[in-house]
Amino acid sequence: MNSQTIPPEHWISFLDEFSRDHLGWLATIEVLDAVAGPQNVADDLPLEGISLDVKGTRPSSIDISVGDWSHHHVNHVVDMPMHIRQADDVGRVDLQFEPGVGPVTLLHLRSRAIGRQEGENVRVVNEARLSN
């Protein structure tokens, strides 16, 4: 698995390109709350995009948008981001958004093709077990 920290001066171009390249990938948004523990905000919804709102000289927020407007839609905001980290593997990508104050947000993405293949493999394995 490859990982990297994205320099703040590249955040806008990185998030624009990342959003284009991963549009429609299945996204899970997880918030790592120190008190309540990990909380999923969204599960397996298609990525619509990630945008950076800049006011003055410092990024003020990151907006993660997932879902399908006709069914379920979630906007998650990370206020005052300090760090963005990326880890990727074949068909999977994780982004970590660390704010100045508050819980870290993890965005887990997987390609729809990987999701279908895994689902088909599980079905084949389960069918084989049932037939024996």
Image (spheres, rainbow, N blue to C red):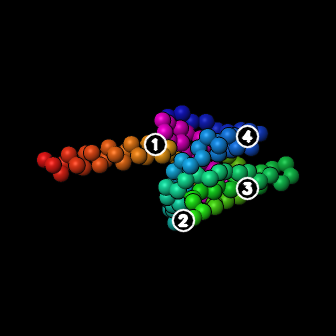
- Count the numbered circles shown: 4
| Residue linked to disc 4 | 13
What residue is rendered at 64% in x and 55% in y? Answer: 64
Q: Earlier in the sequence, mark 3 or mark 4?
A: 4
Residue nearest the observer in this picture, 80 or 117: 117
| Residue linked to disc 2 | 71
- CA–CA distance between discs 3 and 2? 26 Å
* Magenta stretch, residue numbers: 85-103
Mark in front: 1 vs 3 = 1
Give how far across and how far down residue 1 sits, in percent.
Answer: 49, 34
User: Image height check: is 2 above or below 41?
Assistant: above
Q: Earlier in the sequence, mark 1 or mark 3?
A: 3
> What is the crowding at mark 4: few (fewer than 14 residues within 10 Å), some, or many (at least 20)?
few
Mark in front: 3 vs 4 = 4
Q: Which residue extends farthest left?
A: 132
Mark in front: 4 vs 1 = 1
- The magenta stretch spans residue 96: yes
Q: Earlier in the sequence, mark 3 or mark 2?
A: 3
